[in-house]
Amino acid sequence: MKEGYIIRDQSKPHFITATVVDWVDVFSRKNYKDCIIESLDFCIKNKGMILYGFVIMSNHIHLIIQSEESKLSDLIRDFKKFTAKTILNKIENGPESRADWMLKRFEFACKSHTRNEKYQFWQYGSHPEEIFSEKFMWSKLDYIHMNPIRAGIVIKASHYYYSSASNYVNDEGIIAITKVDNPVIDVLKPSSITNNFIW
């Protein structure tokens, strides 16, 4: 892992990214996105995960998370391991029209890594970035929530079902999160924190 992407303080919130190998667009299917939501919900209720924000795109997910109980790196490892196993099982046992193509990609990806038994679903690493300030937290939340807009899926972030944008706009998200307090803004000055919010 690159020096810049080491979790130095396991108790701090971090922005992380989990990407499917070869950028396979697994999450274009609702049932696989639901696996991620169910696993996040389980981790919140049973493994001490604090979830501040998330988005599920077609081939990757972004999370801002913190761990109350265990090392954050262990929580991320367990989350990725469980979701990979669950989603691969769903792909193998269908119905999934792209199963053969996807499984070949996942099988090929693991050939150079002896730690994998048969398939590799997630790319190694999660590019963790420590949230060191309120401004950085909001910049990462903005980045997360703008993903579906940049992808041309929606014109307002809160209209995208599989993100935490609607939690912050109207408390009606698909999963309960821990909301970050709104920053105090000087209305007489432009704010780099909120200028680009289109929630």
Image (cartoon, rainbow, N blue to C red):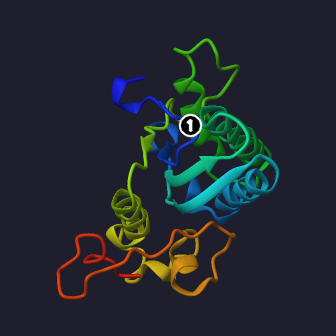
Q: Residue at x 37, y 83 (%)?
A: 155
Question: Residue 46 location, x and y as percent?
Answer: 82, 50
Nearest the eye: 105 or 23? 23
What residue is drawn where x is 60% and y is 30%? 120
Mark 1 is surrounded, within 10 Å at the Cα level, by few (under 14), some (14 to 19) or many (20 or more) other residues, namely: many
Above/below status of 169 relative to 22: below
Query: Which percent across, then down, holds residue 99?
Result: 65, 45
State whether residue 12 is above or below residue 151.
above
Q: How many marks?
A: 1
* Element class at badge 1: loop
Residue plotted at (47% across, 46% down): 17
Which image quarter is the C terminus in? bottom left
Image quarter for residue 191? Answer: bottom left
Extreme-top residue of the structure: 114
Give how far across and how far down residue 30 sits, in percent: 65, 65
Locate residue 156 relative to residue 123 in the image: left or right: left
Q: Which residue lies under the disc numbered 1? A: 122
At horizontal 62% and vertical 62% (from top left) the residue drawn is 29
| Residue 82 location, quadrant | top right
Q: In the figure, is residue 174 to the left or right of 65?
A: right
Hey, what amino acid is under mark 1? Answer: Trp
Give whichever of 136, 81 is nearer the camera: 136
User: Could you tell me which quadrant the N terminus lies in?
Assistant: top left
Q: Quadrant of residue 141?
A: bottom left
Up the image or down, 95 lies above or below 165; here it is above
